[in-house]
Amino acid sequence: MSSTSLSPATEAEEEESTLLPLNALIPAIICITGMIIVAVGGNMLIIISYIRDKQLQTVHNMYLLNLAVTDLLLGCISMPFYAVYTITNWHWPFGTGFCKFFMFVDFALCLESVLLIIVISLDRLILVTKGAAYVSEETFKVGHIKVGLSWLLALSLYGPAIIGWDYWAGESTVGPGDCDVEFAYNSEFTLATSLIEFAVPFLSISVLNTLIYIKIRKRTKIFAKKTNSLDIHTTTIRKDMKAAKALALLVLALAVCWAPYTISTIIIAFCDSCINSDVYEVLNWLLWFKSCINPFLYALNSARFAHNIKKLLACTRR
């Protein structure tokens, strides 16, 4: 059997073809680098603020802390490795084994971020429903149990399928130099998990936040009848409405960043050629963009978080 070797010119052309075209490469590097810096830096500021300020160490903020840790891990793991995959024109240089590990971690982190928003919304509903009883009933122990259960669900929904799908099927659908989940083109599994991962959580969050708004409005009317103090009345209303608006922004960010990716994933599972591959990759990065937005939403909702972030940034400048 004769063997052939590539000429230097052919090898150079092949090496160039593994990178995005120059007009797409530079903007991609700038945008991706900016996203990673904001996601890592912003969520680090939230974590440090929580650790150094005892007034921030509440059960509710503990949920925000876990969400910040999840977003930080997405910025440290998912974004950098997928950045290499993106700028090399979707060529995965890290091997099949690490691809499975990467997918397992990424899918778990993305799902956990959604589940934590459900936990946060449920926590606010319990607060406006139970009032003073919230402090005694919603302890750190209860909070840790909720977070632990959310992680268990996040790890178990996709984990077995990502790790063992090709073994169960007897073959791999992912080609050499590529990195994707084996079930990417299995329409039934993709549809089912998409409903579990996005549709059901989004519906749950929307219902919870609607109930929160109704409870706040109801409590406001009752409080207005019982007190003649306009200052006190204006202050329970502003605090409650501010919390409700912050949750609404979290839900809006989730919808804007997740819905396009989820819908396109379902479409691709049924019709591979119906979504342009470049568009799909942009939607993939849009999904992670939520990790960049969340720290700003925390600061917008909490003057204490905003104060700590400003102090930390001032120290960094000095």
Image: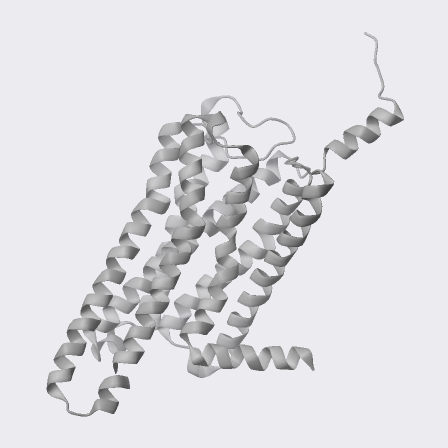
Snapshot quadrant of residue 114: bottom left
Residue 52's place in the image compared with 98, above or below, is below
Q: Nearer the viewer, residue 247 or 176?
A: 247
User: Does the rendering let one see residue 52?
Assistant: no
Q: Residue furthest front?
A: 23
Which residue is located at x 49 percent, y 68 percent? 296
Instruction: Give how far across and how far down residue 46 sits, in percent.
Output: 51, 71
In the picture as drawn, the residue positioned furthest to the right comes out as 8
Residue drawn at x 46%, y 48% as measured from the top left: 108
Q: Where on the picture, by quarter, is residue 22?
A: top right
Q: Is residue 316 left or right of residue 161?
A: right
Q: Is residue 221 left or right of residue 178?
A: left
**Residue shown at 30% from the left, 69% from the top:** 244
Along the viewing direction, whichever of 130 and 24 lies nearer the viewer: 24
The percent position of residue 119, horizontal first and vertical second, equals 33, 61
Place residue 99 in its image quadrant.
Answer: top right
Q: Say how the picture is coloured.
A: one colour
Left or right of 179: which side holds 17? right
Q: Quick check: can you spot residue 269?
A: yes
Q: Is residue 24 left or right of residue 229?
A: right
Above or below, comparing residue 106 to residue 122 in the picture: above
Q: Quadrant of the N terminus?
A: top right
Q: Position of residue 93 (x, y in %)?
A: 69, 37
Q: How many marks?
A: 0
Q: Residue furthest top?
A: 1
Give how far across and how far down residue 44 sits, in percent.
56, 68
Instruction: State which quarter of the image contains the C terminus.
Output: bottom right
Q: Identify which residue is drawn at 83% across, 13% down.
A: 3
